[in-house]
Image (spheres, rainbow, N blue to C red):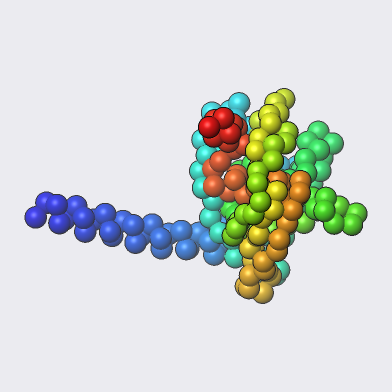
Amino acid sequence: MGTRFTLLLFVLLCLLGVEVKAQKANKFTKAEKRLIKEDGLMRVLTINNEEDSFLLRKPSFDVKADSSNKKLLRLIDRTILTMTDSSQMGVGIAAPQVGLLRNLIIVQRLDQENSPIQAYVNPRIISCAGEKIEGREGCLSIPNRSEMVFRQQDIELEYSDWNGGKIRERVTGFTSVIFQHEIDHLNGILYIDHLANDQD
């Protein structure tokens, strides 16, 4: 009887967890709204701070892609401003790095003309091709450090469009590395986590 009750409770909690995650995907929390509403650059979380490090290790929730959502658009604008600030000089940033556990990344498309900076909502890697190549990576959340990391050079992405649909795109070269690095952030993974695996 005790085992059945425990199993039932576990299943119920799992179901409730899925429901809570679905609710969080639709709306920003009050704390998130306050953070988005602030003025100026956003603070970039770093592993040097214990609270920041804990947050950077948590997985993120989906965002409802909606071009009429002023809070989402403001979050994108502020995140871009933070990434491109002269004190940061990044080529990519993920929402968890500015304190929001949301599946949103900003990437400078070095593979496109004029290297535009673009936002991607709910991105994920569908497939990888070819062999891994080693390259140097740094991270705004790991200041004053860089390491050689092996990454796939050819990936297929999927992300949300502004109409609720999905877009698929193949990305290669260094831009694919940026996507892999930022999507890792959405799953609570930092580039330094790959270092031990690279030595296997």
Residue with the most extreme front position: 131
Position of 120 relative to 98 (above/below): below
Residue 190 placement, left or right of 83:
left
Residue 61 placement, left or right of 115:
left
Q: Residue 194, can we see it? A: yes
User: Residue visible at 28% across and 60% down?
Assistant: 12
Q: Position of residue 177 (x, y in %)?
A: 70, 46
Q: Position of residue 23 (x, y in %)?
A: 48, 63
Q: Residue 43, can we see it? A: no
Q: Quadrant of the N terminus?
A: bottom left
Residue 76, quarter of the rendered image: bottom right
User: Residue visible at 53% across and 55% down?
Assistant: 61
Residue 179 placement, left or right of 63:
right
User: Residue visible at 62% across and 49% down?
Assistant: 183
Residue with the most extreme left position: 1
Number of labels in the image equals 0
Front residue (pair 114, 176): 176
Residue 14, quarter of the rendered image: bottom left
User: Residue visible at 60% across and 58% down?
Assistant: 127
Q: Position of residue 100 (x, y in %)?
A: 60, 48
Q: Position of residue 173 (x, y in %)?
A: 76, 49
Front residue (pair 176, 181): 176
Residue 144, quarter of the rendered image: top right
Front residue (pair 80, 4): 4
Position of 63 relative to 135 (above/below): below
